[in-house]
Amino acid sequence: MMENAVAAGLIRREDGVVSCWWPGADPLYVDYHDREWGRPVADDRLLFEKLCLEGFQSGLSWITILRKRENFRKAFAEFDIETVAGFGEKDVARLLGDAGIVRHRGKIESVINNARRALDLKAEAGSIAGFVWRFEPAPQDRPETCDHAALSKMAKTAESTALSKELKRRGWSFVGPTTVYSFMQAMGLVNDHLEGCHCRERVEEARQRFARPA
């Protein structure tokens, strides 16, 4: 059981660590928060996977998707872009019958469509990473203090709206500005660990060391 709240948006866990509130005490969610969320990523497969999973999350909670993530990876060939781009109707039927994932035809077909659009994007920009990292906000455009009040106002931003618009213009689906901002938070384009969270400083150091893809 968690201890009392330290400040708005922060909790002190049973181990005494101060953390963002949203993972609660779920071990899987805590591990995701501590080890993955906000760490900068330049791997195209991982970026594609996260965009797809954020699309599946639409209308659901992230922990629901996180618990099924290994099933999604198995179902979608580890999110290998070229492989998924080659999926056809038989694959759609297979995926609709897979109880280990979210069986939503529109979202399944969106992943296949987006894989094809991802190949086009790689041909255009060289990599997905090189494209999405162009939309990293400038430091002066970020809140002076990343606290609960600031974060609650950032379901979407000018940058996530711009990236969403550009992806949609290229034919991507399930990439609205709120979905894209969640992707940016997770993939380290911003550091939205709250001030006082034990991860914030480490994530900021990782972002400082990170070589932005060209």
Image (cartoon, rainbow, N blue to C red):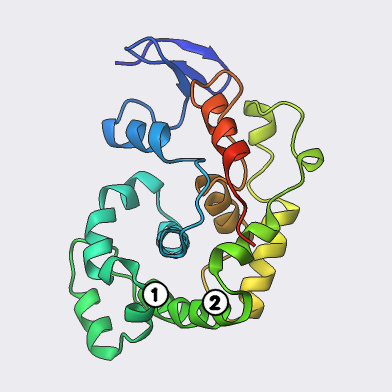
Quarter in which the N terminus is drawn: top left
- Number of numbered discs on residues: 2
Residue lying at 28% horizontally and 70% vertically, measured from the top left: 76
- How far from the left and from the top, in percent, is residue 40? 53, 46
**Residue 133 coordinates in the image, percent (x, y):** 63, 57
Q: Quadrant of residue 78?
A: bottom left
Q: Is residue 75 left or right of residue 61?
A: left
**Amino acid marked by disc 1:** Ile
Query: Identity of the amino acid at label 2?
Result: Lys
> Sequence order check: which comes first, mark 2 or mark 1?
1
Which residue sits at x=62%, y=80%?
124
Image position, residue 182 (x, y; %): 54, 50
Residue where numbered disc 2 is placed: 122
Is 113 displayed left or right of 153 in the figure? left
Nearer-the-camera pick, 86 or 60: 86
| The one of 183 and 212 positioned closer to us in this rendering | 212
- Give me the residue at 66% from left, 79% from top: 169
Check disc 1 and report the residue beneath it: 81
Q: Pointers 2 and 1 in contact (CB under 8 A)?
A: yes
